[in-house]
């Protein structure tokens, strides 16, 4: 079981890249953002609980997010590996992920690929995406800036968790989608 974590601020291209890489390497793409949106649209209990956080650009509670993630991994235990997008977003989630991977698959994260993108580029990308995505958290500049602030306050530190374990690779997230895919693919090939 191979586990690749895609890491970076909102709008850094994790979702776009994860989709391409999942196909290329036959990994299951698991996006906590997509899982939350699915639950929100279907008015599940979990969706209702997460809604106020998502709509206000805040991180959902760790416990809720981790339970959702674990269920999804468990449901996909037949897969040959995962590409995680949007999880872990706090150090406590990173620790929970280690425990879950050990418990379910006796495995660990193979590599964390971090995408670097300037803040103003992030805001412009997300506003542009908001025109077509229909995501409530993509259309309001204030909410977008809160999401970026949440990233720096709670998520950015997670990179040191992986750096300390020699599992972090930092890459440029600005440039053509194909060039970034090629750079990410090169790193995945080293561990797969
Ligand atoms: P983006 O990366 O574009 O900000 P996502 O689709 O990954 O967006 O996530 C959308 C929202 O879902 C986040 O702003 C947050 O409220 C919630 N969310 C997603 N993943 C997590 C997580 N690991 N922990 C807490 N909240 C999360």
Image (cartoon, rainbow, N blue to C red):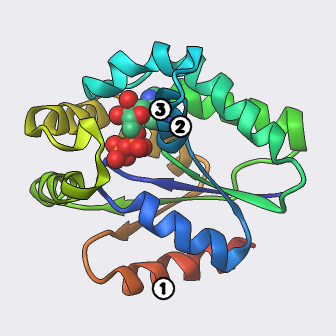
Kindly identify which residue carries mark 3.
41
Q: Marks 2 and 1, how far apart in space? A: 30 Å
Q: Where is residue 62 in the image (x, y as percent from the top left)?
A: 53, 20
Can I make out residue 55 in this image? Answer: yes
Kindly identify which residue carries mark 2.
38
Label 1: few (<14), some (14–19) or many (≥20) C-alpha neighbours in 10 Å? few
Which circle marks residue 182 in the picture? 1
Q: Nearer the viewer, residue 142 or 154?
A: 142
For marks 2 and 1, the one nearer the N-term is 2
The residue at the point 16 percent across, 59 percent down is 128
For marks 1 and 3, the one nearer the N-term is 3
Above or below 76: residue 158? above
The residue at the point 72 percent across, 38 percent down is 72
Label 2: few (<14), some (14–19) or many (≥20) C-alpha neighbours in 10 Å? few
The residue at the point 47 percent across, 32 percent down is 41
Q: For ligand 1, which image quadrant applies?
A: top left
Can I make out residue 89 in this image? Answer: no
Label 3: few (<14), some (14–19) or many (≥20) C-alpha neighbours in 10 Å? few
């Amino acid at each position: 079981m191979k586990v690749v974590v895609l890491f970076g601020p909102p709008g850094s291209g994790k979702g776009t890249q994860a989709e391409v890489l999942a196909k290329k390497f036959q990994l299951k793409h698991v996006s906590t953002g997509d899982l939350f949106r699915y639950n929100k649209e279907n008015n599940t209990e979990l969706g209702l609980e997460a809604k106020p956080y998502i709509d206000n650009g805040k991180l959902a509670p760790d416990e809720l997010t981790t339970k959702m993630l674990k269920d999804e991994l468990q449901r996909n235990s037949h897969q040959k590996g995962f590409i995680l997008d949007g999880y872990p977003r706090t150090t406590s989630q990173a620790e929970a992920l280690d425990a879950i991977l050990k418990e379910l698959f006796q495995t660990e994260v193979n590599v964390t690929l971090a995408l670097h993108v300037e803040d103003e580029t992030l805001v412009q990308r997300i506003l542009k995406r908001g025109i077509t995505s229909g995501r409530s958290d993509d259309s309001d500049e204030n909410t977008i800036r809160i999401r970026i602030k949440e990233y720096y306050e709670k998520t950015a530190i997670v990179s040191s968790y992986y750096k300390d374990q020699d599992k972090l690779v930092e890459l440029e997230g600005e440039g053509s989608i194909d060039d970034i895919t090629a750079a990410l693919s090169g790193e995945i090939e080293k561990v797969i």
